[in-house]
């Protein structure tokens, strides 16, 4: 197992909220100087379009995707989110150098879970198209608004994009045996995050020997998150979902996911798991729960 650390140097949150010429809106963060330190899923921005002002919670994805460029401007430009690049780069490193990935020679069938408006998919195309190559890239999200935004903003990224409930994976129309399953920035303590049952469903769509690569909120941003994380760890250990016992962790690292509206970094952990073949499950010496607890 590889353990590394990639913590970017701090920088000052840009006070300029004006977008470029492609988007007729500006953004302000009223909570920037809020001494109460809003939790990650409570952060909001004010969107100014002409004479209209609208308050939007940053994790209200239906609203964030409604205006082209809004999500990218707030989350990636102003709050410096770098999770898509870091996740895909970390995956690529282990596809090309880790013995556990030796049977994934490409081109690969990849399933992008909680794909949003396609930012992760675009990063996969950018980094993996040449080597090891992509045979088919499928996006999926619970929200139809996410699918619509991806087809609007990045129509050439996915071979197919299906709005689906992964708690019912085999009724979703998604391919049943992907080489790679990606879950980027969708596992945290907020009410907009991916349900644990959906993660369990996604794992059933991963073939034996395939890789699950995901990012996890490493800080637990709200006081009541401990019960959620205990439940998550129980699922990882197998007591809450039989499929999770098949996962062998092969690499992880902590990194800075994005800034809060007040300019503080939120740390996440990126992890790569291999779905073990049945005959190797009992040979995994250290359980996934022990490793994930160490990671967060």
Image: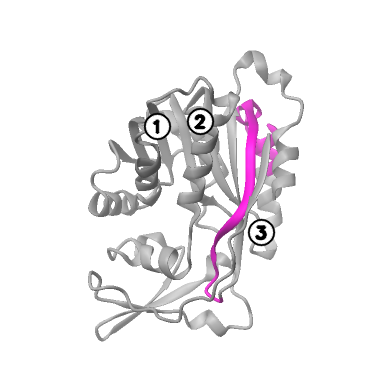
Is residue 234 shown left or right of residue 87? right
Disc 2 marks which residue?
96
Indicate the secondary structure of the residue bearing disc 2. Answer: helix
Q: Nearer the viewer, mark 3 or mark 1?
A: 1
**Magenta span covers which residues?**
233-262
Residue drawn at point x = 73 percent, y = 19 percent: 283
Separation (CA) of disc 2 from disc 3? 32 Å
Given residues 86 and 158, the one toward you in this image is 86
Disc 3 marks which residue?
220
Q: Quadrant of residue 33?
A: bottom right
Residue drawn at point x = 68 percent, y = 61 percent: 224
Disc 1 marks which residue?
131
Q: Where's the N terminus, which quadrant?
A: top right
Indicate the secondary structure of the residue bearing disc 3. Answer: loop
Q: Residues within 10 Å of mark 1 (few under 14, many from 20)?
A: some
- Could you say where residue 124 lies in the image, as x and y percent from the top left? 39, 42
Is residue 37 shown left or right of residue 144? right
Of pointers 3 and 1, the one earlier in the residue sequence: 1
Separation (CA) of disc 2 from disc 1? 9 Å
């Amino acid at each position: 197992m590889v353990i590394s650390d990639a913590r970017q140097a701090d920088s000052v949150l840009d006070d300029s909220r004006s977008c470029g010429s492609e988007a007729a809106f500006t953004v302000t963060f009223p909570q920037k100087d809020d001494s109460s330190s809003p939790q990650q899923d409570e952060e909001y921005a004010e969107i100014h379009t002409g004479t209209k002002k609208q308050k939007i919670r940053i994790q209200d994805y239906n609203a964030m995707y409604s205006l082209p460029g809004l999500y990218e401007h707030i989350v990636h430009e102003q709050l410096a989110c770098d999770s898509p690049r870091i996740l895909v780069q970390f995956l690529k490193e282990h596809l090309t150098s880790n013995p556990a990935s030796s049977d994934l020679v490409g081109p690969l069938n990849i399933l992008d879970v909680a794909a949003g408006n396609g930012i992760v998919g675009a990063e996969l195309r950018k980094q993996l198209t040449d080597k090891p190559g992509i045979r088919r890239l499928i996006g999926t999200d619970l929200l139809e608004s996410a699918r619509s935004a991806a087809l609007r903003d990045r129509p050439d990224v996915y071979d197919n994009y299906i709005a689906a409930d992964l708690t019912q994976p085999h009724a979703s129309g998604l391919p049943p045996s992907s080489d790679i399953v990606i879950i980027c920035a969708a596992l945290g303590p907020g009410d907009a995050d991916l349900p644990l049952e959906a993660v369990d469903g996604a794992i059933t769509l991963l073939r034996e020997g395939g890789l699950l690569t995901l990012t996890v909120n490493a800080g637990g941003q709200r006081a009541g998150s401990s019960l959620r994380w205990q439940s998550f760890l129980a699922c990882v250990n197998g007591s809450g979902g039989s499929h999770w016992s098949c996962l062998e962790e092969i690499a992880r690292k902590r990194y800075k996911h994005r800034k809060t509206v007040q300019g503080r970094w939120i740390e996440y952990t990126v992890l790569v798991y291999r779905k073990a073949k049945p005959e190797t499950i009992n040979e995994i010496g250290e359980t996934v729960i022990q490793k994930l607890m160490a990671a967060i």
